[in-house]
Amino acid sequence: MKRRLARLVLIGVVLLGGTASGSAADARCVVASPADGPAPLEVTFTSTCAGASWHWDFGDGVGADTRTVAHIYAGGTWTATLTVTQADGSQTTGTAVVTAEGIVLVGPRRGDFGRRAAFRGKVVSEGAGAAVTLTAAGRPVARAAVTADGRFAVSTRLRVPGPYRVTSGSLVSNATNLLLRPRLELRIDGKAALGEHATLRASVTPASAGVVTLQTRRNDAAPARVRRAGSASASLDTALPGSYHVRAQLTPAPGWLPVHTTRTYTLAAPQLTLGSSGAAVRALEQRLLAQRYALSRTDTVFGEDTLDAVYAFQKVHDLPRTGSVDARLWTELARADVPGAQVTGDAIEVNKTRQVLYVVRHGETQLVVPVSTGATGNTPLGEFHVYRKVPGFDWVLYFPSYFLRGFAVHGYPSVPPYPASHGCVRIPMWVAQRVYGLIPPGSRIVVHL
């Protein structure tokens, strides 16, 4: 296309005193050079008309306020408008048409990874090709035909962020810098249930989209965070009931949009009693063991030893002595710690009010055992020392450690959660030998209310 000076289209309206006037000289107020050429096209605009001020509207959303100005056009046909204002406030307007040979591309600014998106535009050139090629980050991704008037529409599945351009022969369009929203997935491997093994996993697709932060928070506790490029994982603490709030968030790489997802996992507080079984029983036993309550072992069966440990816990924390586990016990178990001893040094401490025995070493509780003292309250109070021990049965007393006359700490088949003995300190049969081994001759026995 031959270059030419832009023709002036003079509107010539003088806004003064309600009259309009113009002249042939006014028709030549706008000079555009060059008026056509390949995009990007730099055009110099000059007003040949004098005035107090000048305002240019280049037709592509950009303006300027000076008599002479240069402006760069993308491909397309554009109309530039000049407004000349005189000192008396009267105005004269004129226009010039500029043709920049090239391709005008219009496309979305945002999209979702893996979804299709449509681009459209127009080829402005006498020698336009019959098709355009859409490129993403410099690589061809789709082709489309061009209509007789130069228009086209092309779509592609979004895999990378911008810039997106179209080419036709030697022509290249403007760039559409499309931002992509990646896919962020949050899942759990395993079972989100009390005592079960569960792993939280957060991943972004594609992995190059940024860094994933996985945040977990139990109830109102401080959150724990894990950050990884592309994916992150963390074990879900299933040792105690409660609600776990999980948030996965992406810090995006250039060209990608930030995304996040949240989820709440609730670990119920199951009712447990003698004979119950499952992972929740093991979680209960592990928590009791951590707080020094005596157990023969940790497993998935709520047996006699679990029952005795639950009794001991309920006694220490002034809970109803039911031997069963309810929501209240789970709550107390979550915030409890190792019971504190009332004696110093090494001793066997018997608390008649709570009906428990503490094995104390260096003033710290090492073992908590449920007991049953004298039904009539006749178990003596005070500090004593073990003077006799029997490794086995001594009449009906199993592995007794005597501390005063016939009073002893010993195993017995019946250890209810209340005082029921003839005066001795009864402990369960299954733990009797263990406690016996922790009470060497001469050991201090401290009995108090």
Image (cartoon, rainbow, N blue to C red):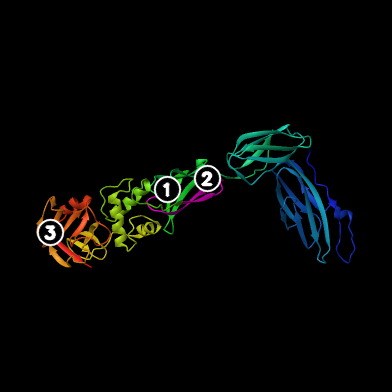
Is residue 248 located in the magenta-colored stretch of the structure? yes
**In which quarter of the view is residue 310 placed?**
bottom left
Q: Which residue appears at 79% of the width and 50% of the height?
A: 31
Residue 189 spot, x, y in % from top left: 44, 42
Query: From the viewer's perspective, is 368 left or right of 320?
Result: left
Which residues lie in the magenta part?
Answer: 237-265
Is 95 in front, or is 303? 303
Q: Is residue 129 above or below residue 224?
A: above
| Cα distance in 3D space between marks 2 and 1 | 24 Å
Local secondary structure at mark 3: strand
Question: Extreme left residue here?
Answer: 387
Tag 2: residue type? Leu
- For residue 184, which numbered disc appears in the image? 2
Residue 62 spot, x, y in % from top left: 71, 53
Q: Which residue appears at 12% of the width and 59% of the height?
A: 402
Residue 261 spot, x, y in % from top left: 52, 49
Tag 3: residue type? Tyr
Local secondary structure at mark 1: loop
- Crowding at label 2, few (<14), some or many (≥20) Cα neighbours within 10 Å? many
The C terminus is located in which quarter? bottom left
Q: Which residue is mark 1?
A: 193
Q: Depth-wise, is mark 3 or mark 1 nearer the camera?
A: 3
**In which quarter of the view is residue 381 placed?**
bottom left
| Cα distance in 3D space between marks 3 and 1 | 47 Å
- For residue 402, which numbered disc appears in the image? 3
Local secondary structure at mark 2: strand
